[in-house]
Image: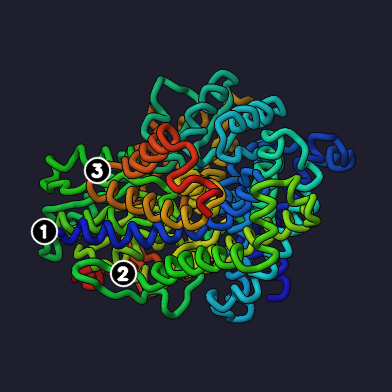
Amino acid sequence: MGDDKQRGTNGFLTRRGFLGTLGAATTVAGFPAMARGQGPAPVKVGYILPVTGPLAFEAQLALNGILLAVDEINAAGGIKSLGGAKLTLLPGDTQNKVELGKSEAQRLIDQGVVALMGPFSSLVAFSVRQDTEKARTPFLLLAAVADNLTEGGLRYTFRMQPNGKAMATLTVDNMLEMANAANVPIKRVAMMHEDGNFGTTMGNHVEAFAKTKGYELVQRVPYNLRSPDFTAELAKVKAARPDLLLISGYYGDSKLIAETAAKLRVGVHALVGLANAAYSNPRFIAENRELTEHIFDGNYWHNPQSARAKTVFEAYQKRFSSPMSNHGVQGYQVTFVLKDALERAASIDRDKVRDAIAKINLTDHILTQDAIRFDDTGENPNAMPALLQVQNGRPTVVGPARFAEAKPVFPVPKWKG
Amino acid sequence: MSGLLLQAVVSGLLLGGVYGLVASGLTLIFGVLRIINFAHGAVMMLGMYASYWLWVGLGVDPYVSVLVTAPLFFLLGMGIQRLVIEPNRDAAEHNQLLLTLGLALFLENLALVLWHGDFRTLRVPYANASFVIGDALVEVSRLVAAGGAVLIALALFVFLRRTDVGKAIRALSEEREGAMLVGIDVARIRAVAFGIGSACVAVAGALITPFFYVAPDVGESFNIMAFVVVVLGGMGNFIGALVGGLIVGLAESLGAALLPGSLKQLVVFVIFVLVLLFRPEGLFGGARGR
């Protein structure tokens, strides 16, 4: 345990992470000549993530997943079709800024990466994808969910995770199905979302398919992420008497909203996060046990039925001394998408790697979905969020049924007046 | 009054108290030093971390932690003034502004390196304490913060009127050369003023922590509004800052309750622009109203 402490609670400056970064830097500088002489040349893989700045916490969790996957791949003998070539990670820090995202992506492309992973935020992704397209470099989107990222006939941009539309549609479907099974029909829905691209996209979807799914959106409240108080907003929501409150937000805002909703007794059957950054986050749950119990979230997740997921989670816990988060899962899995493509491409030619990614049919994965594939636009048609509920302080998959590990508690009495 | 309106007024007043609390130190620093201190939010963030770590490490209640953090941040503020700002006192105003902005960036990134980007929550046992007036919910921790704002404003008021140091601060803010002529050590008084401002915002941070969260960029949630409040109340006037805070809080809360979407901050900034247009010295006439 003493050893674990040195790694930091979420691995911000882990020894291995640091060595990995250092290794990447020295590869570029050509420092360890002896390393070059042995075996095949390493395959350079780039990531651009906001590892400093406002999204640093979440980005680090995703990066931890990438680090875990890269080390697992290298320890198992690297890319076999390339003679056991090891993966070398080249780091890029976007600070969640568009200009930096573009310049870091360009720098990594110039340094000869075979593909880029990142960049977390949809706004940065939207700009970077033009550069990767121009440079004919595969770009594996990480965490970004805005629908328009794959629009425009792009060839090199791929998204493994569900986009905003899939996330919203399938989560609401899952909730409605569960409510019907419990004989508690959902007629009135309220939605709160942050007023950036992410939240607004989610809000638009929930509003758009209200009619077809047979509920009324009785209150839609966009809000500023940095608002220090949501009491008035939630009083407004309460006055609209919704059956369900959906929340698309980040960490601090989601915390304040859940807290205030509980104090106000907002009177819904359930509080449901929609791709919420907090409500299925183990750390948030651990710090707010009482508050988060029985809260729902529709989010990308791992498959609890998968034996491999179990192994990966144990490895993560051991290395970073904290439970693996869904962003970690994404980082881990997207690295293995690239690994699979490299194996089949048997080349570090970016176009060949791109073709191999496009043709992927990966069944050995840890996500709540069928095989990972990509359609012509670069979206994964099988991508699917899980419906999670915090039970006994743990985010638990309660839907869709074939991945569920427990029965949902619904309706939840605690939000009622 | 309908339940929604009453709730909006109550939570607006409580929020306004918090804004006034954060703004009180800022307005003091401006009144004396004539420096727009962009690092104010960052110093508050440090204060919040100080209270957080005292709670986590030693189990010190955040309200009790001010006994430690206030003197500590008084010294820190004096140090910042002596080492960073004083050497640039004669530089152009925009250079000083950039200096405090740079200091803010430095402190935020220092926090990021030291404590990562995690959001941290300080769970005190009474975090959920609240009561109901009419139909309106009142959170005790927010009420305490608003009450703290009033106390700090009054304490500063009395301090500046009754003590020698306070009188020296007032003298300095009114007439620098005159203050020097009567033998006031102006460099020391400036450091004291910056120290008091920093101590105030550390107390603000401690009072906010029980109902908020701690993160390296947490100061940004309050920084902009604190500036609006300072301008509204008149720069250098902390009774004005308190009242300005209440106005901003009310405007924001009522805007949230009555207007669609995220227009609530629009109300605040419309008021802000109107005040700048018609009463640029602030609602309460700047430092003169002190």
Q: What is the crowding at mark 2: few (fewer than 14 residues within 10 Å), some, or many (at least 20)?
A: many
Q: Is residue A240 left or right of residue A205?
A: left
Query: Relative to A75, is A135 on the left or the right?
Result: left
**Residue drawn at (25%, 50%) of the image:** B257
Cα–Cα span, label 2 and label 1: 33 Å
Label 3 neighbour load within 10 Å: few <14, some 14-19, many 20+: some
A397 to the left or right of B118: left
Query: Which one is in front in this view, the residue at disc 1 or the one at disc 3?
Result: 3
> x, y percentage for residue B238?
51, 56
**Disc 3 chain ID:** B
Q: Which residue is mark 1?
A: A185
Asked which secondary structure carries label 3, the reply is loop
Q: Nearer the viewer, mark 2 or mark 1?
A: 2
Residue type at mark 3 is Leu
Query: Image height check: is A309 above or below A290?
Result: above
Identify the residue at horizontal 13%, vertical 40% (top origin).
A212
Q: Residue at x 29, y 46 (%)?
A: B255
Label 1: chain letter: A
* Marking on residue B259: 3
Quarter of the picture holding the C terminus of chain A:
bottom left
Please, what secondary structure does the residue beneath circle 1 have? Answer: loop
Task: Using the image as rendered, state which of residue A219 and residue A37 is in the foreground.
Answer: A219
* Quarter of the image where one finds residue B270: top left
Counting from the top left corner in percent of width and height, residue B259 is at: 24, 43
Question: The residue under label 1 is which amino acid type?
Answer: Pro
On screen, residue A209 versus residue B26, left or right, reads left
Colouring of the image: rainbow
Front residue of B277/B1: it is B277
**Sequence-first tag of 2 and 3:** 2
Where residue A295 sits, quadrant-wise, is bottom left
Q: Which residue is mark 2?
A: B138
Mark 2 lies on a secondary structure that is: strand
